[in-house]
Amino acid sequence: MIKKYLFILLAIVCFASCQTSNKIIKTKVPSRPKGQTHVIGLTTPKLDTVRIGIIGLGMRGISAVERFIHIPGVEIKALCDIRGELCQRAEQTLLKAGKTKPTSYYGDEQLWKKVCEREDIDLIYVVTDWENHANIGVYAMQQGKHVAIEVPAAMTLEEIWDLINTSEQTRKHCIQLENCVYDFFEMTTLNMAQQGLFGEILHVEGSYIHYLEEFWPYYYNNWRLNYNNEHRGDVYPTHGIGPACQLLNIHRGDRMKTLVSMDTKSVNGKKFAEKYGVKNKEIEFQNGDHTLSLIQTENGKTLHIQHNVMTPRPYSRMYQLTGTEGFANKYPIEQYCFQPENIDANIIPNHEDLNVHRAVSDEIKAKLMQTYKHPIHIELETKAKQVGGHGGMDFIMDWRLIYCLQNGLPLDMDVYDLAEWCSIIELSRLSIENGNMPVEVPDFTRGYWNLQKGYKHAFVK
C-alpha cells in the first residue's frame, strides 16, 4: 500500500513538473481604444521644410546638430538641455554653418515641454537619457509633433503602449532612431536577402557587445551605469535586434512570439559601480555582465540576441543570418557563403571558388557587395562617409527620416518596430527573474502583423 501511494505521489510530482516546464509568462495586450486605428504604413502631409526641436545635446545630440547642417530642407528652431553650455556649443555650430540661430532652453528640467508646445516645430528629436525618452515622445505627439527618439525609445511595456496609443490617436509618426539598420554591410545583406540569395532565412543573430569602461564617466550624472545597477536584462537591445527583425519581416508577415533569457552573474558591473559610483548604493548591482536571449517567431524562425558592456572583448553587433541557401556574418569578419548555383554567372564566371563549406573569397565578396549595393547607398554613400556619424550610417538615418517627411511617405521604421525592439528590455527581465521561463511577446500591432508582406523602404515614384 505504501509503495502504491509513493508511486501515485511520484506520478503527481512528475505531472506537476511537466506542467511547470510548459508554462509561459503571459503578457497583456490592452484593447485598442474605441475610434483608434493602427498606423501601419502611416503617411502624413508633405513638409517642404522640416522644422526641428532637439532635446538633449550630449554626445549624440551635438552629433545630430552637425549632421542636420548637411541635409537640405531642415531648420533647427529650438535647442534644449539642462546644461546651458551645451546649448551654446550647438548654437555656435549652427552659426558657423551659416544657419539661423535657434532659441535655446536650459537650466530647468521641465523646459523641454516649452519646445514641444511651439507652433513653429514639426519634429521633436529626443536625445536625452533613456528614462526620459518615452515621456517626452508622448507629450510631443500630444502637442501635434512628429517624434524621433534615440535608442532605446522606451524602457517598459507600459511606456511602449503609451507611445503606440498616442501615435495611433494623434496620427503622428513615432520613430526610433536606430542607426545600425543603415550600416553598409547590413543594408547590402538585406538587399541580397530580399532578392532571394539566401533562400528562406531561418535564424538571425544580433548583439550589442561594447566594453564601456572608458565611457562611464561621460554619461551625465552617471545615468547609464545607474540604470544597469538597478535593472536586470538586456537593457540595450535595439542595435542587434533591429537589423535582425528587418531580415525576418517582423510585423510584415511574421512576428516575435516567445522569448527566453538568461544572464551571468555580475562581476565587472559591481567593480564599475564601486569605481565610478552609483546613485543607489543600498542594493546589489542588478545586471549580469553578459545577457543572452532566444526568441521564436510565429513562422518558426529564431533570433539570438546578446548584450555585454562589462567585459573586455572586441566590439560586435554579431549580425549573422542562416538561410536555406546561404549564410552571412559581419563580426568578427565580414563573410558570405552561398549555394554556387544561386549566384549569377555574370558576377562569378563558372562559379569559381564557390563552396558551401567555406566563405567566398574577398574578391568575390567585393563583387557581390557592389552588385547588390542597396539603392539608398548608391545615392548616399559618398555624402554619408563625408559627413560621418558611425561611418555614415547616422547621416543616412537622418536623411531618410527627412526625405520621408518631406515626401509624405511611410517612415523606414514605425512605432511597432520601436515597440518590438524595445520590448526585449522588460521581457528579458521577466524571463530572468522568473528562472529563465519563456515569456510571451505581445502583438503590438493588435492583430495586424500580417497586413503587409515583406519589409520595404518607401521611395518617390
Image: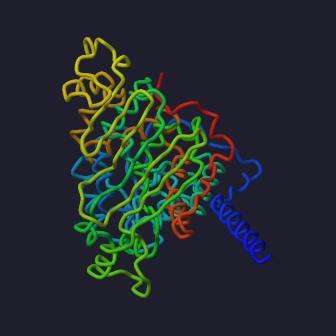
Q: Is residue 135 visible?
A: no
Q: Is residue 239 left or right of residue 155?
A: left
Total count of labels: 0
Q: How is the image coloured?
A: rainbow
**Front position in the image: 134 or 424:** 424
Image point (23%, 21%), residue name: 353
Q: In the rendered image of this protein, does residue 284 appear above or below residue 191?
A: below
**Front position in the image: 405 or 359:** 359
Residue lying furthest bottom = 282
Residue lying furthest right = 1
Residue 182 location in percent, x, y?
36, 40
Displayed quadrant of residue 448? top right
Q: Is residue 123 left or right of residue 25?
A: left
Residue lying furthest left = 363
**Front position in the image: 26 or 426:** 26
Q: Is residue 255 left or right of residue 403?
A: right
Q: Quadrant of the N terminus?
A: bottom right
Q: Is residue 75 visible?
A: yes
Residue 210 location in percent, x, y?
29, 58
Q: In the rendered image of this protein, does residue 350 appear above or below residue 92?
A: above
Residue 421 location in percent, x, y?
49, 51
Residue 165 location in percent, x, y?
64, 54
Image point (57%, 62%), residue name: 437
